[in-house]
């Protein structure tokens, strides 16, 4: 469904992505591993229309995303949950979640149903719905960020390092939620440095190094791979 073909990305003369071929099939949970600066976020910015790729093409369900605006891409069902959460800290949890429904703003009843789904997935957010998002814990803020993306009704959810800065127990909860979202039918592309936890829930994975895909395969094959273990998992 989501397909990147020969995608390149530049920042000025710096080449951040080179000939990226990457695919997410319907129902898949695909993990993108890569160290700091490997180009994970660049892939997401290109895909979500926030930074136009300098070469190649990106499509979803056969329709071209390259050249479309970010909100058109959201309407196509490709939704980014950005690195660093990007919440509005003074606004309430509910207001932050509602922002995700912007492209569906005319469908009140649909949005109400979606909000109930988000509260089912993250009951703590229902308890805290009137609280300022900035006053929540890091893990709860990540749940708001994921919840806001769900309000956009993704067919493919792009998650950029959702476990960053979270305690191990919270990471586990966030990964369980991601697994549930995927099991409920949303395809997921998940960028992570937390390789072990990510590979455990993945159907397939890619390894990105200096803007190139250097390896891909089943989670088991990558978990067994010497170089992957050394770089991302530790002995
Ligand atoms: N706005 C920018 N201007 C110049 N260079 C940039 C810009 N954004 C990213 N880069 C460079 O592009 C490369 C890829 O960055 P990117 O943010 O995609 O990596 P990443 O894998 O998401 O890293 P991290 O794990 O630290 O988030 C890096 O070398 C980075 O320095
Ligand atoms: Mg990044």
Image (spheres, grey):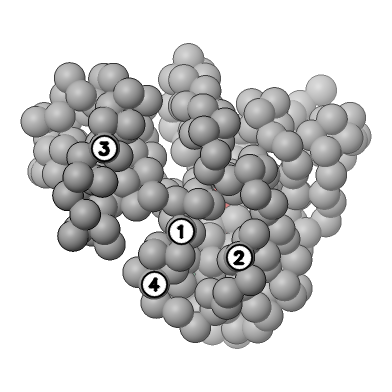
Residue 81 left/right relative to 1: left
Residue 126 left/right relative to 57: left
Could you give the CA–CA distance between mark 4 and mark 3, rounded to whole angstroms? 22 Å
Q: SS class of the residue under badge 4? A: helix
Label disc, if present, on residue 77 of the rendered structure: 1
Where residue 223 appears, x then y in whole percent? 82, 30
Q: Which residue position holds label 2?
A: 61
Q: Quick check: marks 4 and 3 in contact, CB under 8 Å?
A: no
Q: Quick check: marks 1 and 4 in contact, CB under 8 Å?
A: no
Question: Which residue is drawn at the image coordinates 75% and 49% (left, top)?
Answer: 206
Q: Quick check: marks 1 and 2 in contact, CB under 8 Å?
A: yes
For marks 4 and 3, give the one nearer the viewer: 3
Could you give the CA–CA distance between mark 1 and mark 4, rounded to whole angstroms? 9 Å
For marks 2 and 4, give the one nearer the viewer: 2
* Pointer 1 or 2: first along the chain: 2
Q: Which residue position holds label 3?
A: 113
């Amino acid at each position: 469904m989501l397909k990147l073909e020969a995608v390149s990305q530049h920042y000025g003369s710096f080449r951040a992505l080179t000939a990226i071929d990457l695919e997410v099939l319907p129902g898949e949970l695909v993990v993108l591993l890569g160290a700091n600066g490997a180009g994970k976020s660049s892939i997401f910015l290109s895909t979500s229309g926030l930074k136009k790729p300098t070469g190649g093409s990106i499509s979803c369900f056969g329709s071209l995303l390259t050249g479309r605006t970010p909100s058109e891409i959201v309407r196509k069902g490709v939704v980014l949950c950005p690195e660093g959460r990007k919440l509005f800290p003074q606004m309430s949890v509910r207001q932050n979640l509602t922002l995700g429904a912007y492209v569906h703003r005319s469908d009140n009843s649909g949005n109400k149903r979606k909000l109930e789904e988000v509260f089912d997935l993250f009951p703590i957010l229902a308890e805290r719905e009137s609280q300022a998002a900035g006053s929540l814990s890091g893990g709860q803020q990540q749940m708001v960020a994921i919840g806001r993306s769900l309000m956009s009704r993704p067919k493919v959810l792009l998650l950029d390092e959702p476990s960053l800065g979270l305690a191990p127990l919270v990471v586990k909860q966030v990964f369980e939620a991601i697994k549930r979202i995927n099991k409920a039918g949303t395809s997921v592309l998940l960028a992570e440095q937390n390789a072990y936890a990510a590979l455990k829930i993945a159907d397939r994975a890619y390894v990105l190094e200096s803007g190139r895909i250097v390896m891909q395969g089943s989670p088991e094959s990558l978990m067994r791979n010497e170089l992957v273990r050394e770089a991302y998992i530790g002995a």
